Amino acid sequence: MLDREACAALDEADPLGGFRDEFVLPEGVVYLVGNSLGAMPRRTAERVARTVTEEWGRELVGGWNSAGWFAQPLTTGDRLAPLIGAGPGTVVVGNTTSIAVYQAVSAALGLRPGTIVVDRANFPTDNYMIERLGPTRDVSEGFEGAAVVLLAEVDYRTGARYDVPEVTRQVHEAGALMIWDVCHSVGALEVDVAEADFAVGCTYKYLNGGPGSPAFLYVNPRHHEAAQNVLPGWYSHAEPFAFEPRYRPAEGIRRFAVSTPHVLSFAALEASLDLWDQVAVADVRRKSTMLTDLFIDLVGDRLELASPRDAERRGSQVSFLHDDGYPVMRALIDRGVHGDFRAPDILRFGFAPLYTRFVDVFDAATIIGEVLEKELWRDPAYRNRLAVT
Ligand SMILES: *Cc1c(COP(=O)(O)O)cnc(C)c1O
């Protein structure tokens, strides 16, 4: 078992070590919630301020042209594409993941009407959004006879990871269309949705785009002509500034844009992508498996593991089960270890390799040991649930 000194040595040798300074992290906090809201890149504040004062403040409405706001859904899409294994002109950015899920499933059903296979245990919004689009069935019943399959590459509770190429192949073999939700994998591992029919994801988790930063939608070029946008806002019109009374869809990925981009949120996302331009995701994944393996080893049998033990089958998070998970997490947060709690009994710890150090893992495991051993979580103050857990 590694001691703290050995962890510090791993940090010394870490090829991603230099990125930590690119982030603003409070003193004394081990932030293991980058899978929910990524930490703020240092450059973001300045970038957002510049968009407000120089672009909006000086250019006013001219910013739509001069600052490139109008084209943001596509230009930012092209910047994101390599992070999901996609080519240029296949990704549109905007709205939220929930909306992108609705668009992707609607478009897929337009191409192939029938039953939607879902994971009933997936992040609920994906399933809520499509409830009224058609009959659904759980993935445990297989792909046979399905029209559309919607799955999350990495499970938000357990961190379990699907084999994307293999599942995509099986789904296609069954004659169905494949939609991947990569919210919990983009920025954490080498995502490759190129063979899928559609993919969706958010940018505020491992990509550090900031609270409420825009989502993305990938549409395989083989569907650009036939697939329809269920939310055909003016941004997806063939000629938005012709202001024609009738709708005509644009060619290519712009057909899936909806409406005006959230320019200030895009500014924060762009700042983060400037950082991601310098990152090799293979390094991120390598460090991520080292961090999560180390964490599992150090916590040992003090908690029951809910994540796959095999790093290959796991995303960048580690989950444990505890009947009193909520007060345990509150006690940890009070002592500087920030994870989160997912009902009914999951303690979730996400590892963002750009700013999480090996010594952070060591310290987190030590504090977890203390909280459990001394039963510090029994403090009645930790029973009272906050709105966001
Ligand atoms: C985080 C996450 C979302 C978030 O949806 P919003 O529309 O951004 O609120 C959706 N689906 C999955 C699988 C997620 O992990």
Image (cartoon, rainbow, N blue to C red):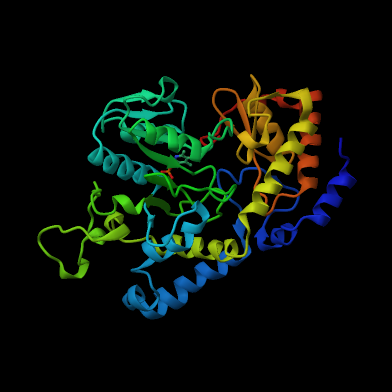
Q: Quadrant of residue 180?
A: top left
Q: Compared with residue 280, is residue 150 higher up or lower down, i.e. above or below?
A: above
**Residue 146 pos. (x, y %):** 32, 28
- Whether residue 44 sits left or right of residue 87 in the image: it is right
Q: Is residue 343 left or right of residue 128?
A: right
Q: Position of residue 174 (x, y in %)?
A: 36, 30
- Locate residue 87 relative to residue 187 in the image: left or right: left
Residue 281 visible within the image: yes
Q: Quadrant of the N terminus?
A: top right
Q: Quadrant of ligand 1?
A: top left
Kindly indicate the quadrant of the structure image that contains residue 62: bottom left
Against 338, residue 47 (above or below) is: below
Q: Position of residue 237 (x, y in %)?
A: 21, 61
Which residue does the image show at 49% across and 44% down from the upper left?
Answer: 183
Q: Nearer the viewer, residue 38 or 201?
A: 201
Compared to 137, does 387 lie above or below?
below
Residue drawn at (46%, 71%), measured in percent from left and top?
A: 51
Rendering coords of residue 371 (x, y %): 77, 29
